[in-house]
Image (tube, rainbow, N blue to C red):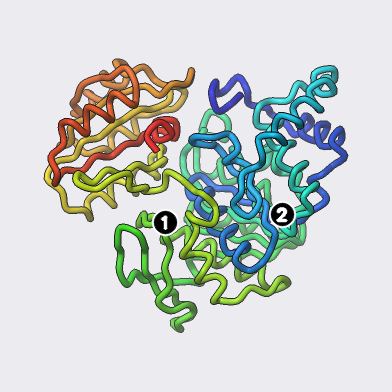
Amino acid sequence: MFQRVGAAAYKANLDNTISLCKILDNPEQKFPSIHIAGTNGKGSVSHMIASVLQTAGFKTGLYTSPHLKDFRERIRINGKKVPKEYVVDFVEKNSPVLTESEINPSFFEYTFGMAISWFAEENIDIAVMETGMGGRLDSTNVVKSVLSVITNIGLDHTQFLGDTLEKIAVEKAGIIKSGIPVVIGETQNETKSIFIKKAEELNTEISFADIEFDLRIIEKTNSKLNFTLFKDNQIWLENASCDLIGIYQLKNIVTAIKALEVFSINNPISKEQIRKGLSNVVKSTGLLGRWQILQNKPLSICDTGHNADGISMIVSQMKNLQFDKLHFVLGMVNDKNIEPVLSLLPTDAKYYFCRANIPRALNAKELQKKASNYSLKGNTYTSVGEAYKAAKSCANPDDLIFTGGSTFVVAEVV
């Protein structure tokens, strides 16, 4: 499965997914979907949109990846994880058929099949479907979209999606469908024309969220981001809040709100429902690992940001915090170019190099060696738990402990 082993599980076309859906009686066509792709922010945007839809009274399916603690985090209806019994029954019922066929589905394909089957059986009103990787060839690209959302484009999974922003944008633009509106979260010079051209080819209405909306922070606390949203220099949403408190969430909030505005043209959602949904994303959907505060005194934070763009935003937010010394618990995977990330990390921190408990994880000694080329110094530890424990024992009350570098590292501390 891609989550654990990486490249060996990547499929280069949708033939498997189409065959899988056919065996399952095409459940993906039995409900409408909001389809979300992007390099960073797609998980947060998916959860924000789902929270508002739930608040507005829609029976909402949510399909995301990867999970942190429990496989069932990936598949939810109105915030509730798919029952364990359903997972077991689905595998028992379908394994004989799937193993006898030539499909031999990957972990992601199997999981996608499970999600759409449950959503169809539960007769949901709407699904929020997050792509796993890319868009054009992602299993989720067979859903019945009513809205496409692309958060942004960055250099990640370059061995599969291409080594430039333009090439990656072409892959993400693969979720744009004929006549189905698309919202782009972040306007980027390298990719804007690619999205506009694709939308024109498919006679699709395209919106750029950050051009239309302007979000201004009023106050940031350890539990809320308070903001006012402007459109055309007029207040569109006043004194609202979001319980996802990373500063990088500002662009995600704008993307989610624009997507909801477009969706509400045919499915009325009030501004009050948007306000309430955004203020309770974590509670409504169970989202973990996004600038999550693990403890105070010393302040301990974790975040799943792991590519250059994600780490850049994390480092930027750290600069807004008051603390004496930074203790950084760091682990990474072995199938990505980590040098661009290491070059962004602060050199005045004490590092605790570790290896997450998955085959794809980079050896802690190797990580330490590569990090030393960027003047990042610290000791190695046999596990994430040991590294985090060491950081807590070394840190003073006014220090900051940060854990990240990989989703899988965060999974072992939340």
Q: Residue 270 lies in what quarter of the image?
A: bottom right
Instruction: Kindly identify the amino acid type of the residue bearing the numbered disc 1.
Output: Leu
Instruction: State the image quarter where residue 401 is shown.
Output: top left
Q: Residues within 10 Å of mark 2 (few under 14, many from 20)?
A: many
Q: Are circles 2 and 1 on residues that touch, CB within 8 Å? A: no
**Could you say which quadrant of the image residue 94 lies in?**
top right
Q: Name the element at disc 2.
A: strand
Residue 407 appears in the rendering: yes
Which circle, 2 or 1, is nearer the viewer? Answer: 1
Q: Quadrant of the C terminus?
A: top left
Note whether 237 is above or below 300 in the view shown. below
Q: Is residue 353 above or below residue 112?
A: above
Relative placement, left or right, of 75 versus 346 is right
Residue 22 circle label:
none
Q: Position of residue 358 (x, y in %)?
A: 47, 21
Q: Residue at x 54, y 67 (%)?
A: 257
Residue 115 in picture, x, y percent from top left = 71, 41
Badge 2 amino acid = Ser
Q: Nearer the viewer, residue 269 or 335?
A: 269
For mark 2, what is the residue? 33
Residue 35, image x, y percentages: 66, 52
Residue beneath label 1, please? Answer: 244
Q: Residue at x 41, y 28 (%)?
A: 337
